[in-house]
Amino acid sequence: MNLEEAREYFSHDRYAVSLTGIKIEEVDKDYAKVSLEIEDKHLGARDHLMGGVLYTMADFAFAVATNTPEHFTMTTNSTISYLSQPKDSHIVGICKSIKNGRRTCLLETRLFDGKGTLLAVVTTNGVHIE
């Protein structure tokens, strides 16, 4: 799936794309790069970025990296380590395959702010559904 096909296909993900505002920047086999501009709606009571925003970005990047209209992969386990708060309003998530087998896969997503600060690392296991 090329970039435009991915954007069209995942435009139907109402939560990640419409509500949260995540954008697909790059896509390839077992790889995705997504981005987000932080808005007021992404902040918690103390005006810090909600951790769920980072998790949603990683979950969406995993979906983009592993799914096509013909091929569905479902998350079976996901672990996130929060490392830092962003220093600016731009976030990028890069998801890459660690192992992609016939039935299962393991991918890692790293989330950075626009200054290159590592915000979180997420590992996600998935199962390929036929």
Image (cartoon, rainbow, N blue to C red):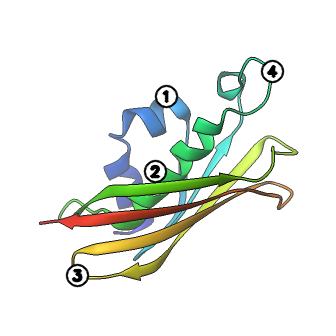
Q: x%, y% of residue 112?
A: 74, 57
Q: In which quarter of the view is residue 30 placed?
A: bottom left
In primary-sequence order, the first of circles 1 and 3 is: 1
User: Which quadrant is home to the N terminus?
Assistant: bottom left
Q: Mark 2 points at which residue?
A: 60
Q: From the image, tell me which residue sits under label 4.
A: 46
Q: Are marks 2 and 1 in contact (CB under 8 Å)?
A: no
Q: In this view, does 20 lie to the left or right of 116?
A: left
Examine the rendered structure and indicate whether residue 108 appears above or below residue 99.
above
In the image, which is nearer the foreground, mark 3 or mark 2?
Answer: 3
Q: Do the residues labelled 4 and 2 touch (CB within 8 Å)?
A: no
- At 60% from the left and 38% from the top, the residue drawn is 53
Three-letter code, disc 4: Arg
At 67% across and 55% down in the image, what residue appears? Answer: 92
CA–CA distance between discs 1 and 3?
33 Å
Q: Say which residue label 3 marks.
A: 102
Front: mark 2 or 1: 2
Locate residue 87, reporting x and y percent. 88, 45
Q: Reading the chain from its start, which is encountered first: label 3 or label 2?
A: 2
